Image (tube, rainbow, N blue to C red):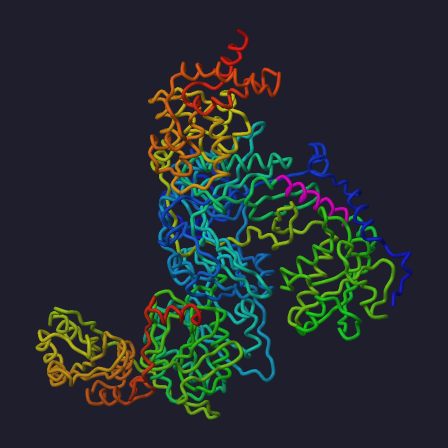
Amino acid sequence: MDKDIFQGYKGASLAILKKYNVRVWGQATINTSRGPFIGTILPRAENDDDKHIVMKIPTGYNIGVDIDTITDMKETGYKKANYKIPEKEFPVTKGLPNVKLFGTGGTIASRLDYRTGAVIPAFSPGELYGAVPELADICNLTTEKVFAVFSENMGPEQYKQLAVRIGEEIENGIEGIVIGHGTDTLHHTGAALTFMVQNPPIPIVLVGSQRSSDRPSSDAALNLMHAMNAAGNSDIAEVMVCMFGPTSDDYGLLHKGTRVRKMHSSYRSTFRTIGDVPMAMVDRKKITTIKKDYKRRRKDRDVTILPYFSDKVTMLYYYPGMKPDTIDALVDAGYKGIVIVGTGLGHVNKELYPAIERANAKGVVMYMTLQTIWGYVHMFVYDTGRDMMAKGIIPGANMLPEVAFIKLGWALGQTEDPEKVKELMLTVINDEITEREPYNGYLVYQGEVPEIKKFMRDVRK
Amino acid sequence: MPKHNSKTKSDPENNYLKSMKEVEYVPRKEATQETYDKIGFMSGLEVHQQLLTEKKLFCHCPAGVYNGNDQFDAEVIRHMRPTLSELGEYDGTALMEFKTRKEIVYRLKNETTCTYEVDDTPPFQIDKTAVDISIQISLMSKLNIVGEVHITRKQYLDGSIPTGFQRTAIIGVEGEIYLKNKKVRLIQLSLEEDSCREVSDIRHTRIFKTDRLGMPLIETVTYPEMVNPDEVMEACNYIRFLNRSSGKVRTGIGAGRQDVNVSCKGGTRVEIKGVSRTKSIPELTHNEAFRQWALLKIRAKLNAAIPDTKSWKMNHKQIDFDLLGDLPEHLKEAHESGYQLFAVQMPGFKGMLSHFTQPGKIFADEICDRLKVVACLEKPNMIHSEEFRQATPNIDLLIPDNIFDRDDTDAQIIFWGPEEDIETALETIEERCKMAFDGVPNETRKSFDDGTTIFERVLPGADRMYPDTDSAPIPLENERIENLRKNLPGEVIDYYHKMREWNIPEDTFIYILRNNLFPLIERITNDLKVNPKFVGTTLGHKLKFIEGHYQSSGNFKYEIIYDLFKFLKEKKLELQLIKPLLTVAWQHPEMEFNIMLDTIKFNKISREKIISKIPILEKEFSEIRISKNSGVETKWIMGHLNKIATGNMALNELSSIIDENRAI
């Protein structure tokens, strides 16, 4: 009961509210040594202190009142806010593709949460249609909230569940699937679904937003439109990530689930295809294919769902001076697979060798990936690389570290036999390892260089 | 093919003049308090003032660095979508802005823009100096300081802020200021980030630059307690002077600007945005009150003429350019651009389009302005049946026969635009006409130098507020507030009374207070024992004149005036010298004072030596004898001695000696 009436208040501030019998959402006058304050009492975020009471004053602003200054307080009315996106039934238009949207949470659809003072996921087709009515011009949409977690809470269990649900939807004849997802681990899920949902006949598009949908400048609406368009209309039957191409509200890019990475903590154009070119450009109306070689959309429903994942897999980010006990500790803890993120072409220091040997002897599989993000592991170039291979470390070619981690978890979920794991790891499913790195697959331009300065002003938006 | 006999047609100009009389409009100069009482003039202010900080409010870009419209390194494009407020409502302005479908382009300059300005990174911690200055100014405004500052997002979908909202926070509520004859209460003071500066707004593209974006700005809001235009200006000046007296605010063009809220009895709150010159406030508020009064008159007339306003509808038809004969120039252009042409009939609106609203403005302008803003149709965008201010084609000749069922009570508009904007344009016209049945629409208006205003946006309400989920609340402890209270300057109203007591002429007050010079006058008076009236006029007359007439090489600081007075005192020179010296100091503030004396060709000459020259000059004058008037003689002699006397002896003393000399 108290929880509802005094939402978020605790300790001293809760005591004050109780003392004067003033509720959250109550309209109140508070007299203080700094003068009187009038407004509606708002809930307080759980992690904020117990020394202030939050109120919305008549001009719409929020302020906090210091409880030590309060001399008197009186509730004069009560009005609870009803935060609700207007819900409208999503219309069905003949001739438009049928798309399923799976909700997993994240900022793609969210609203204010008083508990944390941050945003929480909110999601329904009606709400989405109310907020982004343009979606109805793109596809016929059904939605399902599979779970509501923040991106960082997505993990193996969710991957497996999603894969199974995707398989069912494909069997039911859906023409495209969109997955709304928090952006932090969007690329992990992209990789996981690529391995777990093999040979899909339709596009499976992961989408998120970098600015929550409660902001007028949010990228959520446009990302959703792009993703729906890609899922419903594109010919690419692969697991892809669809996010802003440039930071401007212009076009989105479709990235292959195994070659994409979040590269900036807050930029809208944070997702980049690494070591290759993106699959396609997408806007509200059209899809322009960039990469000509892709898996085409099919009429059949022959999809293979492989929902396996072992949690006995870990990652080790190497640093100079790393001690062997770090690897020993992981082995002792029972990990069966380690993805090492090494320096340069794929190196760690000699000091680790004995630990690597011990791990290998215990049947722990180890794969080498790169801190440089771009490029291939080349363990033949220097002696150290050859030494390491001899001690059991398998080069992961140009597999991205996160992708290698997901793939190893997926492989170990199926077998612990190192040879079989190796076969799974090195058998390419969808470009997680590529034979060649296109020349323009690595582009990180530098500001203020004359040609880039010109490019920034004239072209890049 | 006119269908109506021209004799039965209304004469729009006469109608304009007649309606102006009915509204009882009087020019501001002729208006008295009674005039304003009758129409129920009411006005409040939102005074904005940039704070003097090194960096912007929520990021670490430099504040106060500006660039030209075409100086930019990159551009970013955004579209704004309305979102729900914290209380779960959509805001009216937001929906209107969404209807206009604007593409917003931001021009970025590397020096003044980081990823925060383009909304690609969350805010950094709020600038502490800015919070301290706002607390001080809040204390000076007698506001109750909040216990905890909550950053709030205030939605702006016009694109002036790339996030689509302004981060703003209340520092104090419920304060007051004292005008000459009354007290005005303040609603609140907030600290907020300044918005972008607009470069252009044509059709569906609005361009902004981000140099000013994010600079700390305070907004002081008064209750609507001013009852005549002069009072509004007085209150505005007071708040601006109070801000200046803190010594911690920015000065210069655009550093201070205000929104003025006006209503009349039965009208509604209309906000005149971004008024940068306080001087224009009286004319603007006067005209706005009367515009509302006129709209109420229109309401009364329409409700009398149209029996059922609820079911009122206008009619429209597309017409073919080719059906029209010789097209006027702008219509030819529209035709060439592939625009569509529409005729609109508004039953019962005869005499309304040419109805007075503001001096030189008619109701038809209200529609025309909305077509530009809401439907993005650039002007000229329409012609109508009651235009008289310029030669326009006779609309009867343009609207083909029989397309409407016409009668004597309707009015017509012809407008043109691209196909995709026609629907919004039609809605806009109908909406504005329907609003006329209710009187005065809630809106913000843009001001012009002639004292008139045009529609800018629908007035946003409290529904556009949302807590900023990216920032934590900031507690303001008593200790911090009390420390800041220790260093407050004096009160502007006390300055005012003190200056009157000193007999400083009132026409200098605005200059002195605007530049926060009172403390300087007080120090010169107290420390150097100079007559305050003399210091006041030196600043308020002489210095003001110099500023307006001479170029300064740059670093002129008011503090130099103190040093100049001190220098004259120490050198035992006449204080009159301050005036020529000030002219030099303004132009070359780095120059040494001794050299300044040389520059004005000052020579130290004894009093006796100057007086000894009088007889010779008298003799000379008697030879040329241009007049018998002794005053002329004194003036003539003074003219010759002025230069050597200045600084060496008081000129009025010299003048009386000349007079005495003659009397002997």
Reply above or below: A180 against B516.
below
Residue B82 in the figure: left or right of residue A353 = right
Main SS category, magenta section? helix
Residue at (30%, 88%) from the top-left corner? A428
The reply to whether the magenta stretch includes residue B286 is: yes
The answer to whether residue B85 of the structure is visible from this angle is: no
Residue B596 appears in the figure: yes
In the foreground, B594 or B509: B594
Q: Horizontal and vertical percent for residue A394?
A: 19, 84
On the rendered structure, is B278 left or right of A235? right
Rendered-image quadrant of the C terminus of chain A: bottom left
Which quadrant of the figure has residue A204? bottom left
Residue A333 relative to residue B90: left or right: left
Q: Is B107 on the left-hand or right-hand side of B412?
A: left
The structure residue drawn at horizontal position 60% and vertical position 34%, both measured from the top left corner, is: B231
Range shown magenta: B282-298
Corner quadrant of residue A179: bottom left
Residue A154 drawn at (x, y percent): 35, 71
- Identified at 49% across, 21% down, the residue is B502
Q: Is residue A398 magenta?
A: no
